[in-house]
Structures are given as C-alpha cells and as structure tokens.
Image (cartoon, rainbow, N blue to C red):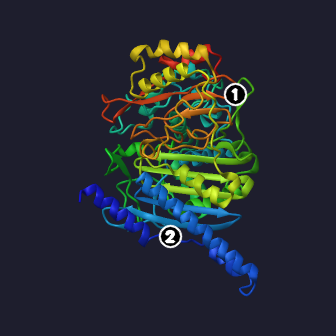
Amino acid sequence: MGNGMRLWSACLVALALFPATSLAARGVADEDSRTDQVHAGSGQARDQVASSTVRMLEIDREVRAEMARQKIPGVAVGIVDHGVVTTRGYGFANVEHNVPVTADTIFQSGSVGKMFTATAVMLLVEDGKIALADPLTKYFPAAPASWEKITVRHLLTHTSGIPDYTTDTFDYRKDYTEGELATFAFAMPLEFAAGSRWNYSNTGYALLGFIVHKASGQFYGDLLAKRVFQPLGMTTARIINEADIVPNRAAGYQLVDGQLKNQDWVAPKLNTTADGSLYFSMRDLILWEAAVKRRAALKPESWEQILTPVQLNSGKRYPYGFGWFIDERGGLPLHQHGGSWQGFKAQLSRFLGSDLSIIVLANLAQADPARIADGIARIVDPRLAVRTPTAIPDAEPLVAAKLRQTLDALRAGNAHASGSRVRARWLLSRSRGVLQGAVGQTRSADEVGTAGTPRGRRRPDVPVRDHVRRTRVPRAAGARTGRPRVAVLIACRKVGAPEARRVRLPSGSDKRGRRELSTLNSLRPLLREQGGRGV
C-alpha cells in the first residue's frame, strides 16, 4: 500500500473512532443538555431526543461524506441553533501523530480574521483615534498621490481600488516589515477609483493593521488580545507564531498530485498581518459568535456600520460590510465570511432568519468548508438549502460550443490562444444570457479538491443574487482569501449584463503551479463594452 493510501486509510479510521466531541461552552447548554431539561417521562421529551439524535446522525454522515470526497484530514464543526451549542470533531488534527480533532484544536483563521481586524479598527474609531473618513495619506505620507482620496472606510469595504498583494511577484519567503509591505502596495497601480467598485483586497486589510498600529501605538494583535479576546474569554485566540509552543495546534495540509503533503512554509512576518493571521479553536469561535449576536465589544452603532452593505459611488449597494459578507439564503439574511491560509480553511455562517450559526474549520488547503456548512444548514432548516440553478435553454449551440472552447483555453492559461480575445468579443456581441450554464459542470466531485473556498455568493452552483453565475479555477497555494480565487462571471439571467472581477488561472511556469491573469487584459474590457456592471 502506498503512503498516500495509508494516510487516507488512517483518516477514515479516525472518522469512525473519533466521530464527535460535544461542548457546553461557558453557560451555554449543548444539545443533549437541552433535551434533558424536558420532562423525561413525556412524549414530547422522547420525540425531541429522537429528532435530535436523527438530525445529528444525518449531520455526521454529511460531514464524513464531504471529508472523504474532498480528502480532508480533519474538521471541526460548531452549530449554534437557537442558542443551543453543539460541536463535533472529525478526523485528525495531525495525521503524522494520529491526533484527533476536538473543540480545543487550534486552526488558522485565514480571512475569517478580517472581521476581527474590522473590530479593532472600530474600537479605535470609538476612541476617537481613527475616523472612517481619514485619508490613507494621513497614516502613509509616502503613499502616491493617487491614494489621497482613499479612506479607511474604503479599505474596510474592499472598495479602495488597491490591488491584492498576493500576486506572482510577491515573495512569500521574505520577512517584510510593515514599511516594506506598505511600499510594495504603493507601487501597485490602482484598479479603479475609490468607491466606484468592489474588489477583494488582502492588501487593504494588511494596511488596516498598520493603521491600527500607528493610531494606537500597539500592534493590532496586542490590541485584539487585550480588548477583544480576553474580555470575551477567547483564551486560545491569538496571532500565529510557529516558533511558540501552542497546545492542541493542528497541522495544515495540501494536496499535491492527489497526495497529502504538509503546508508550504511562509516567512514568519507574513503570519502576523491583519488580512488573516490568527490562531483560534472552535471554543473561541463559539464565544465570538455569541458576542456578535449580543453585539458585545463594540457600541451598537459600530456594529450597525460593520453589518451594513457598502454603498458605492453610484448609489448601489454591494453585499459586503466591514469584514463580513452580507448575503441572503432562501430569502433570509446570511452574514458570513470564509478564510484560507497555509493549509487551513474556515467558514463562519450566521443564518439570521433561522437563528442558526454554523462554523467549519478544516486543515486542508483545498477544502471547501462552505459546502459542509451549507449541507448542515440544509439538514437543520430545509429553507436554507442551496437552490439548484435552472439552465437557460441552449438556443444557439454554435455560440455555446465556441464559448466552451474559449473557457477551456482560459482555464489552461492561454488567454490569447486561438484568438480567444476575438472569439470572446464575438460571443459577447451575440448574446448576454447564453453564457448561463456554459461551465455549469465545473464543480464535479473530483474538482472540489482543487477549487477555492466558496463564500455563498461565489459558489459555481449557486446563483449570485439569483441572476449570475461564476466558474472557478484553482487558487495559488500561498494566497490568502475569503472568496474563491477566480472569477469569470458566466451569466446574467435577469439584468442581462455580464460582469467580471479577476481571473486566476493555472500555469506550469509558476513554481506554485498557477499564475494570476487579470480580465483587464482579456475579458474585462469586452465586458465593459457590453454594458457589464462592476468591471
């Protein structure tokens, strides 16, 4: 038996031996405790216990099935249903030492950490040390003149126009100082005028960490520890430090040619930036979820700003607040964010209309924790099931065939191969709706292991505001994101106008196995010509 098969056999054994660990978190009863409160002799009690048991067995099957399909070594799940907390641990936190996942296992945050960065900024806003309207040049006098109209608010809402620093030219093995990272950002041309559009930018949140440091005189991680983690009882939440002895720390993994490998190494300083560099356990996040629900740590007006969708210069809203995506599911509000970093994935989803929160932590770079969270949500409340999109009738087979050929060339990294640009121009001129479903099958069972983490609105099998669809390609192993690294918008069903953000495509020339291409060089200008939004 090969090494890879041995590892996966061990993980499957772990799923059987360590199926779940429950948590009664600081005064919050777990599911079993609540059912015990009902009179044991009543029919109602028996029905509730039976229903609860059946539901948890279904959730266990769902999680185990996804772990096996996605080849995830270990997963922690937290469910808060009407204030009742249940946690489950599946598989291994460390494959080499056969350590099972528990509620105390320490995972990395990825971009889930952005909601904590936003909290740190708002604490200083309440202190009068930062204003949301402050221009960046107040904190970075050496910034280019083009940054004069960019404000702190623009950074919080990803509307600054500052590109993502996690590109092919970025050296993940270099220990950048705060000043060096800022200088790196200064050199990148803006993608658009501040406030005119939305585009996810890790750079913006890294800069927010530097602003917190400048305004408070404290490293942002120290401020979080003192004013957020300690008051909320999040005793194991902290900034990443691989040199420290950290009890219960999980190992991060990645799949390379289908084989489980340890995560890539990055420079220590890159594990301290404010775009997502936290350690936390499921216990910590259960306490954080409770704090968000009761609006702790900040004033009500600060929470109101954090959880309000940003308004663009055009007056239109984009569903992102300060470190949170403000979405909907089944017509009910959904506040969520995901994260990806160094062999870890995370998803925190708050289904407000159902008083349900689901947290999923995984230790595999290619894991899809949002899919697991969505599966659990469907079991708990069928109204939250992800709708299966309806394909638009293929009235123009020739157009559809040429589109598939063009997209295949783009996925292969040949943005200009075989006249892709010219063909794309022709396709877009012929139809705006026919693109629906052209890549509807991209999310196969085998592809999940190489796809970026979906965040509800970006999943290729989920409509975006019920009228657009996107396809995804693998993201760089070192890149940190709270959205899938992809991004070709495939369709428009209601508004009839395509839009695009960014395309990240594989490339054999890059040592990470992929490179980033901007739609500015291929599809973006064409989409703009066709009346696309947000391009």
Helix, strand or loop status at disc 1: loop
Asked if one can make out residue 301 in the rendered structure from this viewpoint, the answer is yes
Q: Secondary structure at mark 2?
A: loop
Q: Which residue is mark 1?
A: 312
Query: In the image, what residue occupies the spot 50% across and 41% down?
Result: 443
Q: Is residue 479 left or right of residue 56?
A: left
Q: Amino acid at mark 1?
A: Leu
Query: In the image, what residue type sits under mark 2?
Result: Ala
Q: Can see residue 231?
A: no
The location of residue 481, given as percent across then percent down, is 50, 40
Q: Of circles 1 and 2, which is in front?
A: 2
Q: Quadrant of residue 419?
A: top left
Which residue is the site of mark 2? 20
Expressed as whole percent of the image width and height from the top left, the position of residue 174 reads 34, 37
Nearer to the camera, 18 or 61? 61
Percent x, y of residue 250: 40, 60
Return the residue found at the far left.
1
